[in-house]
């Protein structure tokens, strides 16, 4: 009891520290406002803020009119500064909240005594031990775990790299506020440093002056490897080994590589003509340079640490022999040689540094002056490790050498595995041209699906090529072939792990996947030997995106796996087939309820197909950051997988603002990856102990009915209401989002105004900006009501499903998060921008009715008094943020109205557009969501 009171008291004190940090940063921002714009600016900002808070506390029509009038009457120059003041305030609050997450973890560990933090690696290992899992069981579980997190360049990060750098420095200063040993002078210096940074933030342009190039996006992605992941990821492995040694003493543990990062950036060419084969090669080179620089730095630091002298210790003969060999193979410049012959580790490290440096030197390729592979670097590190243990420097070996070995195992000389993605239509177009030129078939594109499959199967079995360097191909076909040649070259130079998956957008038939394999054969990535064996180093990965695609997926995979040659190609990839599932397009196509349901059904059916052919599936989940695109915490994403569908491992995309929110600070990155590891272990434990979700036929029928009704309701509005798309474009900042330079990829798949060609990211981004978050909840209420029908006995069933059916609970909790963030009062202000009064009233009526129905049913199902009572921390965060987001929303409506009226008369105003874009950034920061 005393311990619990202590924890409660500490939690309260911890929350007080968060409020302290927010107030402290708010005060500094206030000083900057006065310094930059005088007391008048601060007074205006404070008056708007206070009025907004009052309206949230009690909505009074007169006060609301005054509030809108106050905002509407701001002079452009003052308005511009007010927008930036609120936007920067949110940036500072986000920094404080991120730091507070790190503080909470440390406070828990400091005050909990023997109690272990939920969601930690130690908690999961402790539960394995308590559940009776033996060391042999755990070794088996570790061998099955696989999680790959894939960075993408999806344009949802609204912040520039320069801003993120300032945020990092502010974060480091704020963290120092907790240091109780700071003197008064040091605290004043800290305050002065923060003031400098906030002024710098105020005077730094939040908006990019141009769209980033693909290589800019690659650099942005590499930033997180350099800043956090190279250091944090090995620490997660180290913690798992520590816990295993604690609970299973006497056992030797070396964790297999179960958690790693990949990337799409520089490889995703779907709808992005800027991603060429040359760009992909440049990406691989940039990734290699990053890995080499990291190893250079680590080896340099090791030279400073490993000062052991043979005057005192006896190193291994193996180490001495390796140094002698290095002296023969690796010439060093005079300044590179370590001249103290009694410090053999430093001598060895000098040669290792030279061999790492030479990895980037083309002139040294194929010589012993460089490491031919990351495995060779590990060999040298193991020699040092064994020698250190030889003279009982075990702690040094564990602290320094084992960590670097883990880094090399994880990042190699390629940093991250790069996925290639292209639209299926591009392969079909190339195949049509190639086969016509070789006189194999005049019009491949016009063949029926079965005819295509038969032809492609024959071509895979035929060792003869179907392309020739002496033939002229169109630019698009030549580029298509160049991609495969680049993959082959990369695998030869960087190792097979640098690229292993070729993803196919809009996979709608088995032929889409076979085309990729036939084209891969032309570059030497796939071949059938004379004895019938298959050599394959790349895999076709289908991406099933729409509801129709998800329905067709099981039969497509069954048709493919019936082909002996394709089945053999899967066997060559360790009997593992990767399949990607798109959360964004399925949600845009069918709504949140149906998308989640159909994804679950598809995974279960695909797993059955895999079992028929005795292969394993690795599901690649294309989750976005926003709720309307499958966004949720990483550990919940793992635990939300249907039972029996994770045997081959999991891949998950990490996109846009998710990257900076999870991986810009080491403490946050560590906690996120720790929770992911804990979720993997927990999921494996449930599978083996039989505690995983049990099939309940009644519940399956109910959720099927809910999904069907929800789909009908959703598509009635989105697809079948002739006025809806115009309402959407006019009542959200959709057109203006395209002018925010946050990604190299176009916002539409084609140059058209059709809803079908609009990408899911701007679809969700626009609804988030208008505060309705419609894609994240619309039609859920109608689906739930179709079963409930105001019958108490039916509600009791739904309540039981929420308690005991993990899929349903996750769905309801996702819905209530979206409902909590939505604000229909403000959404109605955006709707005033639409021209068609009748359509506006009708569509708003449908949205409002559905919102109220969904909210009511969620409260009834969960037994809560208010939405998000089950997550009070987030509930409070949303409640505190809303009054500060509201002014930006009202200003955005005003600015959009003015800008659009001007453009209708063929005018324009760069400053007005700039203010619109600043409100977009500010609202994104305030809601902590973009697309």
Image: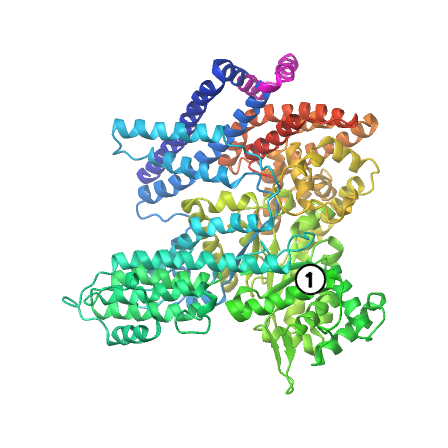
Q: Which residues are magenta?
A: 48-77
The residue positioned 72% from the left and 52% from the top of the image is: 704
Quadrant in which the N terminus appears: top left
Q: Secondary structure at mark 1?
A: helix
Residue 438: in magenta span: no
Q: Is residue 111 visible?
A: yes
Q: Position of residue 725 (x, y in %)?
A: 78, 38
Q: Is residue 480 above or below residue 815?
A: below
**Circle 1 residue:** 479
Q: Is residue 255 visible?
A: no
Q: Tell me which corner region of the image, top left, top right, bottom left or bottom right, holds residue 930.
A: top right
Q: Position of residue 568 (x, y in %)?
A: 64, 77
Q: Is residue 847 left or right of residue 109?
A: right
In the image as oriented, which residue stretches furthest toward the front? 334
In the image as oriented, which residue stretches furthest toward the left? 311
Magenta segment, prevailing SS (helix, strand or loop): helix
Q: Is residue 149 above or below residue 10?
A: below
Q: Position of residue 502 (x, y in %)?
A: 63, 63
Q: Which of these two is toward me, 364 or 886?
A: 364
The residue positioned 64% from the left and 29% from the top of the image is: 916
Other residues around mark 1 within 10 Å, as few (<14) / some (14–19) / many (≥20): some
Q: Is residue 279 left or right of residue 594?
A: left
Q: Which of these two is toward me, 555 or 437?
A: 437
Q: Is residue 587 above or below residue 849?
A: below
């Amino acid at each position: 009891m005393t311990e619990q009171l202590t924890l409660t008291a500490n939690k309260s004190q911890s929350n007080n520290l968060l409020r302290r940090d927010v107030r402290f940063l708010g005060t500094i921002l206030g000083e900057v406002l006065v310094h930059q714009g005088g007391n008048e600016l601060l007074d205006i900002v404070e008056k708007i803020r206070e009025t907004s808070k009052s309206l949230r506390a009690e909505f009074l029509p007169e006060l609301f009119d005054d509030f809108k009038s106050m905002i509407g009457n701001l002079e452009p120059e003052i308005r511009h500064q007010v927008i930036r003041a609120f936007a920067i305030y949110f940036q500072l609050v986000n920094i404080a909240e991120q730091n507070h997450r790190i503080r909470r973890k440390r406070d828990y560990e400091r005050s909990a005594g023997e109690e272990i933090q939920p969601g930690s690696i130690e908690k999961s290992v402790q539960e394995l031990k308590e559940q009776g899992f033996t060391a042999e069981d755990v070794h088996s579980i570790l061998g099955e775990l696989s999680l790959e997190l894939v960075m993408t360049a999806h344009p949802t990060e609204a912040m520039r790299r320069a801003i993120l750098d300032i945020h990092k420095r502010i974060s480091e200063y704020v963290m120092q506020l907790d240091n109780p040993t700071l003197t008064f002078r040091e605290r004043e210096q800290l305050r002065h440093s923060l003031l400098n940074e906030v002024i710098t933030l105020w005077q730094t342009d939040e908006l990019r002056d141009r769209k980033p190039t693909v290589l800019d996006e690659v650099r942005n992605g590499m930033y997180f490897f350099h800043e956090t992941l190279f250091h944090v990821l090995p620490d997660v492995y180290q913690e798992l080994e520590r816990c295993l040694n604690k609970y299973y003493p006497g056992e030797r543990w070396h964790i297999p590589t179960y958690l790693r990062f990949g990337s799409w950036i520089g490889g995703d060419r779907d709808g992005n003509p800027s991603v060429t084969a040359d760009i992909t090669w440049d990406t691989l080179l940039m990734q290699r340079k990053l890995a080499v620089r990291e190893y250079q730095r680590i080896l340099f630091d090791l030279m400073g640490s490993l000062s052991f002298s043979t005057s005192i210790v006896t190193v291994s003969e193996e180490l001495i022999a390796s140094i002698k060999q290095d002296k023969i193979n690796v010439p060093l410049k005079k300044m590179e040689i370590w001249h103290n012959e009694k410090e053999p580790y430093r001598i060895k490290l000098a040669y290792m540094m030279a061999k790492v440096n030479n990895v980037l030197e083309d002139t040294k390729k194929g010589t012993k002056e460089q490491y031919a592979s990351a495995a060779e670097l590990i060999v040298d590190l193991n020699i040092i490790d064994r020698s250190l243990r030889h003279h009982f420097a075990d702690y040094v070996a564990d602290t320094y050498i084992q960590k670097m070995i883990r880094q090399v195992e994880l990042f190699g000389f390629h940093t991250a595995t790069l996925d290639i993605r292209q639209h299926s239509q591009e392969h079909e177009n190339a195949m049509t041209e190639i086969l016509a030129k070789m006189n194999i078939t005049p019009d491949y594109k016009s063949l029926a699906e079965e005819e295509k499959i038969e032809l492609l199967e024959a071509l895979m079995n035929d060792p003869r090529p179907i392309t020739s360097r002496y033939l002229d191909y169109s630019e698009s076909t030549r580029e298509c072939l160049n991609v495969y040649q680049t993959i082959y070259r990369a695998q030869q130079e960087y190792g097979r792990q640098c690229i292993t998956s070729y993803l196919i957008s809009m996979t709608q038939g088995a032929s889409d996947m076979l085309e990729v394999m036939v084209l891969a054969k032309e570059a030497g990535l796939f071949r059938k030997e004379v004895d019938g064996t298959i050599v394959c180093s790349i895999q076709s990965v289908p991406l099933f995106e729409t509801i129709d695609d998800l329905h067709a997926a099981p039969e497509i995979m069954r048709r493919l796996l019936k082909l002996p040659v394709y089945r053999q190609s899967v066997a060559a990839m360790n009997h593992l087939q990767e399949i990607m599932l798109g959360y964004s397009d399925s949600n845009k196509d069918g709504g949140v309820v149906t998308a989640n349901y159909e994804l679950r059904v598809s995974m279960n059916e695909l797993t059955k197909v895999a079992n028929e052919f005795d292969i394993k599936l690795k599901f690649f989940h294309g989750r976005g950051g926003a709720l309307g695109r499958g966004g949720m915490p990483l550990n919940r994403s793992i635990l939300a997988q249907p039972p029996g569908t994770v045997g081959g491992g999991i891949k998950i995309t990490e996109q846009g603002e998710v990257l900076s929110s999870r991986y810009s600070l080491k403490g946050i990155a560590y906690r996120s990856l720790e929770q992911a590891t804990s979720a993997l272990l927990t999921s494996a434990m449930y599978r083996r102990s039989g505690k995983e979700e049990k099939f309940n036929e009644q519940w399956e029928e109910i959720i099927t009915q809910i999904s069907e009704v929800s789909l009908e309701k959703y598509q009635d509005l989105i697809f079948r209401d002739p006025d809806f798309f115009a309402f959407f474009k006019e009542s959200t900042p959709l057109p203006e989002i395209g002018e925010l330079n946050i990604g190299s990829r176009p916002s539409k798949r084609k140059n058209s105004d059709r809803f079908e060609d609009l990408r899911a990211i701007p679809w969700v981004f626009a609804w988030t900006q208008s505060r309705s978050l419609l894609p994240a909840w619309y039609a859920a209420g109608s689906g739930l009501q179709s079963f409930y029908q105001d019958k108490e006995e039916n509600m009791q069933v739904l309540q039981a499903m929420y308690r005991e059916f993990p899929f349903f609970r996750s769905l309801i909790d996702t819905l209530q998060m979206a409902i909590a963030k939505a604000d229909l009062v403000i959404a109605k202000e955006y709707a005033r921008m639409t021209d068609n009064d009748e359509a506006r009233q009708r569509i708003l009526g449908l949205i409002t009715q559905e919102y109220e129905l969904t909210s009511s049913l969620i409260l009834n199902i969960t037994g809560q008094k208010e939405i998000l009572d089950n997550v009070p921390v987030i509930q409070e965060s949303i409640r505190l943020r809303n009054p500060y987001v509201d002014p930006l929303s009202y200003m955005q409506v005003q600015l959009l109205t003015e800008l659009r009226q001007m453009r209708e008369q063929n005018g324009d105003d760069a400053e007005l557009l700039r203010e619109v874009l600043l409100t977009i950034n500010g609202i994104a920061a305030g809601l902590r969501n973009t697309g």
